[in-house]
């Protein structure tokens, strides 16, 4: 059974940092590109960024709204994806989902709340 | 960046009605388009991939069409369990989602 399990969400103050993790199982993690997608409360889905697989040199891409503040990484030996979030803003408050492509696997999401 | 314009933003229909949602891409994306259903507190669920292909296990009342820049998603006969928010998504270049269509029962 395919599973993506996010963790690491919580309450953080503006300007703070948080690291999200996504543990994958049930599929060949190393073959897939991996995305982070977020959803602010009551809002739509927003793509955050991507890390490609080894065959594509693990290159990363980011949405303009997070570029320079967020960093995506992966550890294929641990079947894990990470999102390091720095300089957090109140508008980063959202449920963060990990997504595996192109097979379209989704995690259940983890809530990040940025508030003082 | 590719922009996706989805309409309407909300829709109220009766059980049994035919429901149509449209999505327009800011540039040609061929057929690299998905349609998702999302219910509160849940991750998006893929219904249609490659613009017109029904995902395994999805009821046949759901369908999609289009290519290039203009796409349509249809529910042929609305059921109570279809109440959800629907999103289009392009994957020709990274990912971009439409704004979503909130579907309610009249």
Image (cartoon, coloured by chain):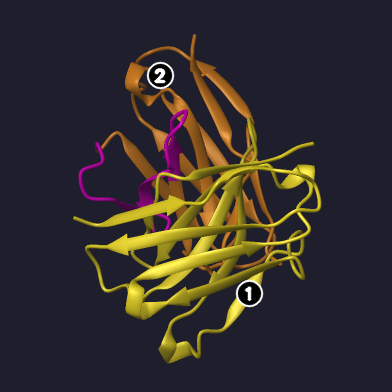
Residue wearing tag 1: A61
Q: Is residue B105 left or right of residue B98?
A: left
Pick the residue in front: A74 or B81: A74
Instruction: Name the residue located 37 percent from the left edge and 61 percent from the top edge.
Output: A23
Which chain did the image draw in yellow?
A: A
Image coords of residue A85 (percent x, y): 67, 60
Which chain did the image draw in orange?
A: B
Q: How many marks?
A: 2
Residue B20's disc is none
**Picture quadrant of residue B2:** bottom right
Image coords of residue B94 (percent x, y): 57, 69
Specify the quadrant that holds the N terminus of chain A: bottom left
Instruction: Name the residue located 56 percent from the left edge and 67 percent from the top edge.
Output: B29
Q: Residues within 10 Å of mark 1 (few under 14, many from 20)?
A: some
Residue wearing tag 2: B17
The question of residue B71 being in magenta is answered with: no
């Amino acid at each position: 059974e395919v599973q993506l399990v996010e963790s690491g969400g919580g309450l953080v103050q503006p300007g703070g940092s948080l690291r999200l993790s996504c543990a994958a199982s049930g599929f060949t993690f190393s073959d897939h590109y991996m995305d982070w997608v977020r959803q602010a409360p009551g809002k739509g889905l927003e793509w955050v960024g991507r890390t490609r697989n080894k065959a594509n040199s693990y290159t990363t891409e980011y949405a303009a709204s997070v570029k320079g503040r967020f960093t995506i990484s992966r550890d294929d030996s641990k079947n894990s994806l990470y999102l390091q979030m720095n300089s957090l803003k109140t508008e980063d408050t959202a449920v963060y989902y990990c997504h595996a492509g192109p097979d379209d696997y989704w995690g259940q999401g983890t809530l990040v709340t940025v508030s003082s | 960046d590719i922009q996706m314009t989805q309409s309407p933003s909300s829709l109220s229909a009766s059980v049994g009605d035919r429901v149509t949602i449209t999505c327009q891409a800011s540039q040609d994306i061929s057929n690299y388009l998905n349609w998702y259903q999302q219910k509160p507190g849940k991750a998006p669920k893929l219904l249609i991939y490659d613009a017109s292909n029904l995902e395994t296990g999805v009821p046949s009342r759901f369908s999609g069409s289009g290519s290039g820049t203009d796409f349509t998603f249809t529910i042929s006969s609305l059921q109570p369990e279809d109440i959800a928010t629907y999103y289009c998504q392009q994957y020709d270049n990274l990912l971009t989602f439409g704004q979503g269509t909130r579907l309610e029962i009249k």
